[in-house]
Image (tube, rainbow, N blue to C red):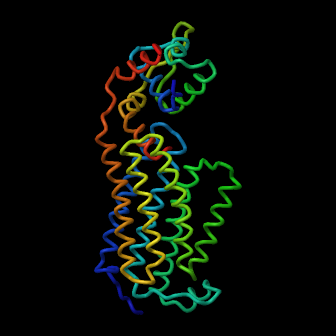
Amino acid sequence: MKKRTRLEVIRDMLGILRENKQVKITHLIYKANLSNNSIKIYLKDLLENKMIEEVVEKDRRFFKILSKGNEFLEEFNKIKVFSDSFGL
Amino acid sequence: MLLNFSIGRYYGLDSIIEVLMILVSFVISYYSNRVYKLVKEKNYRLFSFAFLAIGISFIFKILSNLTILHRVNVQVANFVFVVFHEFEFMETVNFISLILYKSFHLIGFLILFLLVTKTEKKEKIFLFFYLGLITILFSVYFDFVFHLTLIFILASLTFHFFENYTQKRNLNTFLVFIAFSLILTGHFFFIIESINPLFYLAAEIITLIGFLSLLINQIKLKNEKTNKIGSNQRYVRNTKRK
């Protein structure tokens, strides 16, 4: 199977978060098909870019998609074509 | 002080062409910056800077077209002395606008080159910019040096975009490849413009077609469908099944 690009992994993670109200990190690892180490890097980036937010409820950590994350999903196809056309 | 303005060569056709190329460059720069704001990936910001620099370079090119009647060739080794002590105001404007055009143009394409070759070592980047500076200085005396350097950079870029096209085989990658091939060809014509002034016009038109090809790519991009809710979820499910 072809290796996913960084943009595709972000698209998958945000897609999972959009389909579900709140997602635990373990579910995200399973659904996005990522390793424990790599998901931490992606989550850090997404949190820094304010695409997602972390919610703590009863000592459990959840992740929620924010409007910027939704905007990315809407624009994903365009960004992908732009990125591919210049080989960025 | 003599203030003679020209609309540019060929009744200002070159200036009009450059205005169009400014618009295309700024559209690409704006979009890349938008993507950068969304994904915060350094590549997109640099890409945006590159096209911004190319767009700015054409503004200075237009300024040099407007003051072309005051163009003076420098033949003395110490050009700084000549420019500040012997040049009239308008001659200085023409000289500086031409230098700025070359600088911004070279910086723009150099950033693109460093981006696609994924050059990240600071020493290499510093060396490339130093060689760029040397090119600008030499081009004061020999204009072809500037175009020749750009030909090398553009040849490398064209090769990269050709490889990108062979890997992806779609219209967008083809348009980008064609665009850079045409910009490269344009600079070949700029080198031989002294043989026949018509080559200058040919160079401008070929370069414009190149930039228009990039514009078509951007328009195609704008018409690309946006992701509907759930489509990515289906993708995740499908990849899981595999």
Q: Where is residue B211 drawn, in percent x and y? A: 37, 59
| Residue B95 placement (x, y as % from top left) | 50, 81
Q: Which residue is at the front of the view, B67 or B110?
A: B110
**What residue do we see at 50% from left, 33% from top?**
A49
Q: Residue farthest to the right?
A: B123
Residue at image point 56% right, 80% down: B140
Q: Is residue B152 above or below residue A72?
A: below
Tell me if B135 is positioned left or right of B203 in this view: right
Q: Is residue B160 above or below residue B39?
A: below
The vertical placement of B207 against B231, above or below, is below
Q: Quadrant of the N terminus of chain B?
A: bottom left
- The residue furthest top is A58
Could you tell me residue A44's position as x and y percent? 57, 27
Q: Quadrant of residue B68?
A: bottom left
- Picture quadrant where residue B20 is located: bottom left
Foreground residue, B6 or B171? Answer: B171
Residue under the image location 61 percent in, 76 percent down: B137
Report x, y in % for residue A54: 51, 20
- The foreground one among A8 and B49 is A8
Quick check: B63 left or right of A49? Answer: left
Q: Total of numbered circles in the picture?
A: 0
